Image (cartoon, helix red, strand yellow):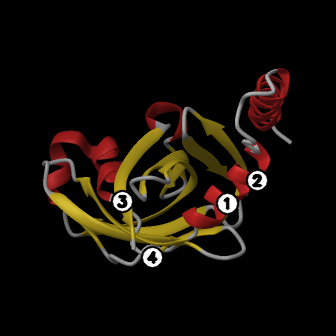
Amino acid sequence: MSKKTVRFFGILFAVIAATGFVSCSDDTTSNFDPAGSIAEIFENMKGDYSGTYNTPYNVRKEVRFSIDKQAEFKISNFPMENVLYNIYKGEYENVRLNADALTFSAPIDSVGYDSGFLTFITKSNTIVNRIDFSYTKDEETHNGWALVTVKGIFNNTMKMMDANFIVTDLVIDNKDYTSTTCPIDNIVEAKHQ
């Protein structure tokens, strides 16, 4: 388990313990069960989402993703534009992605509860978190792969999610761009369907 995950679980435990302590210390408070409420909100979070994100030239594009019953985060059209823009900047106009349906899937690793919002992060895994892609620039084809982690915040009241698809590792044509470009954030605002 990574240091971030251990720290996250420690924070989650402290929040649940503190909430339970406050609830138990005053007999007049409601019977709020943070563990039960978190589990219920987590179940409410599962399902299909539709949202938008900004491309490098401020064009809004639609993206759809889902969280299945086994808490697997799945997307079939990963937003690659921002990743390629980070590589080419001003020359991005000459880049054409060879496929729009770039799939990504990763299990949710841990959840937390902060100020009324459920937070989560997907598991770091170099096999399932990898997106393979190809594109053409100046009539030359390039191949690459990226490792992605998703951090999300779910608003149960509004049935909205902010999902950040974070590229943590990036290799193109066997050249490692990780240290010069990563992390790359791709923030999507999405509505539960």
Q: In this view, does 172 lie above or below 74?
A: above
Q: Would you say residue 107 is visible in this rendering?
A: yes
Furthest residue in direction front, as rendered: 28
Residue 71 or 38: which is nearer the viewer?
A: 38
Q: How far apart are marks 2 and 4 (CA)?
A: 32 Å
Where is residue 10 shown, x and y percent of the image?
A: 82, 29
Q: In which quarter of the image is the N terminus?
A: top right
Eye-nearest disc, 2 or 4: 2
Q: How far apart are marks 1 and 4 (CA)?
A: 27 Å
Q: How far apart are marks 3 and 1 (CA)?
A: 20 Å
Give me the residue at 49% from left, 37% from top: 182
Circle nearer the N terminus (3, 1): 1
Question: Which picture quadrant has residue 23?
Answer: top right
Q: Provide the residue designation for mark 4.
A: 76
Using residue 62 as the reference point, say whether residue 17 is left or right of it. Answer: right
Give me the residue at 71% from left, 65% from top: 127
Q: Name the amino acid type tagged 2.
A: Gly
Disc 4 is placed on an element classified as loop
Residue 113 or 103: which is nearer the viewer?
A: 113
Circle nearer the N terminus (1, 4): 1
Q: Provide the residue designation for mark 3.
A: 190
Q: Distance between the residues labelled 2 and 1?
A: 6 Å
Disc 3 is placed on an element classified as strand
Q: Which mark is residue 40?
A: 1
